[in-house]
Image: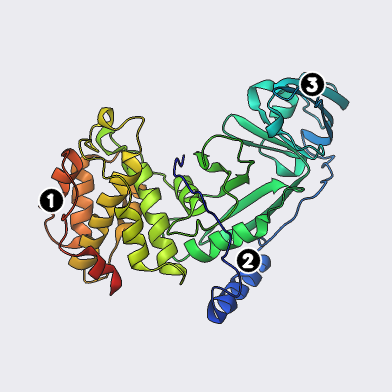
């Protein structure tokens, strides 16, 4: 989940703005992805597979606009296959009442509906974009869908959106591949991920459930120093579990690394931009990251946590002479079979910095300001 406020988002990462060299690399990556079976794949008005055990095809979505606060959405769909559940094969209609009109396309092309409001025959198909049904958490997107798939380092990421929505899934998947592929987040293969583009009427800028996310911010770059797209993708790659005192790391690492990856891979963002963005966030003095009860229902795990990881990353880079960074910590945590404790986290950081970091434990357990935890982080990142 991403509670960040991104008020002025513009999708300005284009082929011309990333430079000729990056464009050539991007073209090579794109062609290679297509050769191995991924690359942009569009699924518009898909046809069912008659040989599958269960298939669904959404044929129409009708909404009653009479009520401005709650509408009825009627789905017309066909089901078939050898396992259709309790519903017989053929054409069916199902009405969902009490739907917020802003969750439904006025032209009847798509609707975001609560999974609990749908019949089992549709829920069985959820997660299959070729059926016109995609699920993420408690939501199901139904309708005429457009998808694109690209490889991010070693595993595919699929971006899906209503075909009628003014957003290009292929651009988003391509940006993720281009900007995140340089980083090894796992010791083995990365996790395949799915991201759905949602209307901004849904709560939060983005939310991730396991390896499936929805994002309401349609611009890839927020115009400042971070990206909710990278943030939510990183959540999908967090294979690690944490002890209670390390729960803050989940949001903090997605927040900080999204900004750092954008800075390192996209020339419009500079190290000083990341520092300024982090330092402008609330330090949440008086909260202790190791004690969730002090920051629950606040953004301290996002921003106080990101500031701490900014300092930890600088310490790792400085101590290792630039050989290691916080991504190494993320990857090592992903390899752990047991929940990562505070002691283990400090040990992992020190193993990559090559020195004792006596400030780190106090910064996580204490409630004071995080200013001055390292001598000059900006100089480390500017090198």
The answer to which of marks 2 and 1 sits earlier in the sequence is 2
Q: Which residue is mark 3?
A: 95
The answer to which of marks 2 and 3 sits earlier in the sequence is 2
Query: In screen coordinates, is 154 left or right of 80?
Result: left
- Asked if residue 60 shows in the view, the reply is yes
Do labels 2 and 1 touch, CB within 8 Å? no
Q: Which residue is mark 1?
A: 359
| Distance between mark 2 and mark 3 Cα atoms | 41 Å
Query: In screen coordinates, is 14 left or right of 302?
Result: right
Image location (x, y in percent) of residue 373: 16, 54
Residue drawn at point x = 48 percent, y = 61 percent: 180
Do labels 3 and 1 touch, CB within 8 Å? no
| Distance between mark 2 and mark 1 Cα atoms | 44 Å
Q: Residues within 10 Å of mark 2 (few under 14, many from 20)?
A: some
Q: Secondary structure at mark 2?
A: helix
The C terminus appears in which quarter of the rendering?
bottom left
- In depth, the one of 150 and 9 nearer the eye is 9
Q: Nearer the viewer, mark 2 or mark 1?
A: 1
Residue drawn at point x = 59 percent, y = 46 percent: 194
Q: Residues within 10 Å of mark 1 (few under 14, many from 20)?
A: few
Residue 33 — which label? 2
Do labels 2 and 3 touch, CB within 8 Å? no
Image location (x, y in percent) of residue 284: 26, 40
Image location (x, y in percent) of residue 266: 47, 69
Residue drawn at point x = 85 percent, y = 24 percent: 93
């Amino acid at each position: 989940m991403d509670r960040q406020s991104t008020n002025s988002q513009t999708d300005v990462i284009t082929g011309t703005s990333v430079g000729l060299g990056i464009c050539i690399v991007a073209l090579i990556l794109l062609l290679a992805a297509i050769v191995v079976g991924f690359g942009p794949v569009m699924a518009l008005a898909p046809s069912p597979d008659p040989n599958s055990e269960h298939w669904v095809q959404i044929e129409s979505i009708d909404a009653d606009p009479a009520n401005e606060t709650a509408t009825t959405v009627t789905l017309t769909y066909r089901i078939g296959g050898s396992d259709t559940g309790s519903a017989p094969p053929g054409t069916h209609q199902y009405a969902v009442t009490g739907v917020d009109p802003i969750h439904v396309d006025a032209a009847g092309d798509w609707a975001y509906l609560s999974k609990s409001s749908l019949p089992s025959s549709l829920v069985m198909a959820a997660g299959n974009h070729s059926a016109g049904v995609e699920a993420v958490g408690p939501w199901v997107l139904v309708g005429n869908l457009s998808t694109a798939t690209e490889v991010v380092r070693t595993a595919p990421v699929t971006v899906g959106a209503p075909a009628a929505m003014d957003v290009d899934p292929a651009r988003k998947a391509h940006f993720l591949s281009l900007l995140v592929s340089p980083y090894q987040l796992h010791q083995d293969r990365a996790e395949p991920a799915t991201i759905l583009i949602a209307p901004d009427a849904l709560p939060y800028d983005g939310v991730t459930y396991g390896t499936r996310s929805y994002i309401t911010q349609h611009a890839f770059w927020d115009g400042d120093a971070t990206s909710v797209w990278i943030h939510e993708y990183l959540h999908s790659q967090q294979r690690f579990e944490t002890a209670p005192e390390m729960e803050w790391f989940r949001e903090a690492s997605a927040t900080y690394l999204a900004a750092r990856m954008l800075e390192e891979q996209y020339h419009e963002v500079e190290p000083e931009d990341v520092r300024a963005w982090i330092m402008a966030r609330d330090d949440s003095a008086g909260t202790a990251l190791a004690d969730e009860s002090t920051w629950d229902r606040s953004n301290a795990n996002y921003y106080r946590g990101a500031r701490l990881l900014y300092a930890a990353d600088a310490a790792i880079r400085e101590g290792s002479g630039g050989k290691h960074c916080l991504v190494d910590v993320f990857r090592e945590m992903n390899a752990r079979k047991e929940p990562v404790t505070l002691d283990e986290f400090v040990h992992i950081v020190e193993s990559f910095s090559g020195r004792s970091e006596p400030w780190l434990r106090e910064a996580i357990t204490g409630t004071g300001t995080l200013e001055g935890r390292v001598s000059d982080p900006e100089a480390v990142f500017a090198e």
